Amino acid sequence: MAEENGLSQVFEITGKDFGRAGTISTKIKEILQEIGIDSAVIRRAAIAAYEAEMNIVMYAQRGTLTLTLTPTAIRLDVDDEGPGIEDIELAMQEGFSTATDEMREMGFGAGMGLPNIRKNSDEFAISSTPGKGTSIDVVLNLNQVAE
Amino acid sequence: MTLRDVKEILQAQVVCGESRLDEEVKVAGASDLMSDVLAFGMPGLLLLTGLSNAQSVRTAIIIDAKAVVYVRGKMPDAAGAKLADEKGLPILSTKLMMYKSCGLLYSRGLPGISDFLAQGR
Ligand SMILES: Nc1ncnc2c1ncn2[C@@H]1O[C@H](COP(=O)(O)OP(=O)(O)OP(=O)(O)O)[C@@H](O)[C@H]1O
Ligand SMILES: [Mg+2]
């Protein structure tokens, strides 16, 4: 799917599918590595994608992660259908988590995901409609190479 | 120290990545919480963990970890082992518990993340 000034690829993520959780982000990392983007930027993008993917698996019914590459940036647009987030300010605080014991046993539920997505982004936006779903848009700038 | 030194110090079994044992490891961290690893981990990290599901391997790959050490005799699950093999991520498994594993490596001079970062300053 071509978008203006960039190439997009859409990945489907299934809620509660803990076995596959993380596979989309691993794939995104591979794609970025093949293109030859700076490894520090790839690492930040992969971390943001992984945390967003885990949140869909843990909390939502389903969602998509759209990876868009432009000459100057990597965009990650994450949209899910799920319970949404009532209080985004609270959810963004380090340590706030509603994860269940099952999720904690899997190594998640530290309440670090959303703050860490923001930390690894150059631009970060989150919006949510309770009862409908949540959207996160992340941009990572690519270092401009002098010509 | 090298991964081979880590293997010997922890009397560990090599689950995969035998060919990379001579590579150097400069920093280590330990956690069972993957989002802490994602937040505080760093490239080249030796990750010690008691969490042996596929998420531990995926997390290690996402943060560009050097290798994973499972403590308390844990082994990766099938999906994790397959991915580690594909990506060439070395995995060791030691029967020692977390505290002792970390203590042994630290006392032999393998720094934690904060020490490592402070050295660089
Ligand atoms: N996509 C989502 N849909 C609904 N609720 C969400 C979503 N993402 C996050 N939340 C809510 O925000 C809280 C904080 O999310 P965050 O990712 O920061 O931490 P966590 O997922 O609980 O733990 P961690 O990410 O450290 O494993 C979650 O516990 C959950 O209540
Ligand atoms: Mg999370």
Image (cartoon, helix red, strand yellow):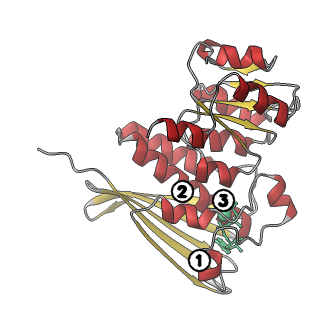
Q: Which chain carries label 1?
A: A
- Under mark 3, the amino acid is Met
**Which image quarter holds the C terminus of chain B?**
top left
- Disc 3 + disc 2, Cβ < 8 Å: no
Find the residue positioned furthest to the left: A147
| Distance between mark 1 and mark 3 Cα atoms | 13 Å
Q: Is residue A10 left or right of residue A75?
A: right
Q: Which residue is drawn at 80% across and 19% down?
A: B12
Identify the residue position indicated by label 2 in the image: A49
Q: What residue type is labelled 2?
A: Ala
Q: Residues within 10 Å of mark 2 (few under 14, many from 20)?
A: many
Position in image of residue B60 (x %, y %): 63, 39
Instruction: Compare residues A94 and B109 and report the one nearer the observer.
Output: B109
Task: Estimate how packed mark 1 is, as few (under 14), some (14 to 19) or many (20 or more) residues with alpha carbons within 10 Å.
Answer: many
Location of residue B54 by image quarter: top right
Where is A18 relative to A115, above or below? above
Q: Does the residue labelled 3 lie within 8 Å of ligand 2?
A: yes
* Residue at 78% from the left image edge and 42% from the top image edge: B53
Residue A37, given in percent of the width and then of the height, sits at 35, 42
Which residue is disc 1 drawn over?
A134
Answer yes or no: are tags 1 and 3 on the same subunit: yes
Dot placed on the residue nearer the N-terminal end, 1 or 3: 3
Residue A18 percent location from the top left of the image: 75, 54
Rendered position, A21 above or below A35: below
Secondary structure under tag 2 reads: helix
Label 3 crowd bin: few (<14), some (14–19), many (20+), radius 10 Å: many
The answer to whether mark 1 is within 8 Å of ligand 1 is yes
Q: Mark 3 points at which residue?
A: A54
Give the mark nearer the N terminus: 2 vs 1.
2
